[in-house]
Image: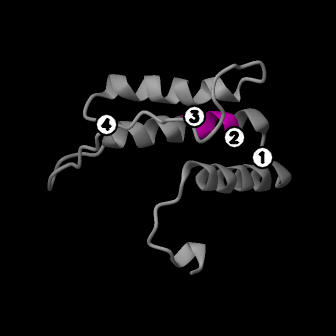
Amino acid sequence: MDEKNSSETLGEAAVLDRVRGHVGALLAGGADTATVAYVLAFVATELGLSFAPDSSEVYGVVLTAACPATPDSQSPQPDAVIPVLTPTVPGPGEPVH
C-alpha cells in the first residue's frame, strides 16, 4: 500500500525523514537557517501546547527531543522512547492554545 494512503501511523524515523526533506527544500529555496530553526521550535511547542493537559510537560518534551541532536550528545538518537503527552481535545467553543 502506498505510504501516503496507508492508515498506519508514521513512526518517528519516517516523520523525521519527511521533516528533514521539508527543511532541506526550505534551505535550498533560500530560507535563513536561523529562521527555519526558530519556526521548527515554535511549531513543536505550539503543537504540544495544543494537546497537553499540563503545559509544563511540553517544554520537557521539546528539550528532551533537542538533546540527541547535539553532536557530542550521548543521548539516544531517533527511535528513542518519546515521552507521550495525553491529548486534551477542546470541547465545542473552547479555544485551542
Element on which disc 2 rests: helix
Q: Position of residue 7 (x, y in %)?
A: 44, 72
Q: CA distance from mark 4 to mark 2?
A: 24 Å
Q: Amino acid at mark 2?
A: Val
Q: CA distance from mark 4 to mark 1?
A: 30 Å
Mark 4 vs mark 2, foreground winner is 4
> Residue at label 2?
36
| Dot placed on the residue nearer the N-terminal end, 3 or 4 | 3
> Residue at label 4?
52
Q: Crowdedness of circle 1 by 10 Å Cα count: few (<14), some, many (20+)? A: few
Render colour scheme: one colour
Mark 1 vs mark 3, foreground winner is 3
Disc 1 vs disc 2: Cβ atoms closer than 8 Å? yes
Q: Is residue 46 left or right of residue 35?
A: left
| Quadrant containing the C terminus in the rendered view | top left
Q: Position of residue 80 (x, y in %)?
A: 56, 36
The residue drawn where x is 15% and y is 52% is 91
| Dot placed on the residue nearer the N-terminal end, 4 or 1 | 1
Q: Amino acid at mark 4?
A: Ala
Point out the stretch of residues depicted in magenta.
36-41
The residue drawn where x is 44% and y is 24% is 59
Q: CA distance from mark 3 to mark 4?
A: 16 Å
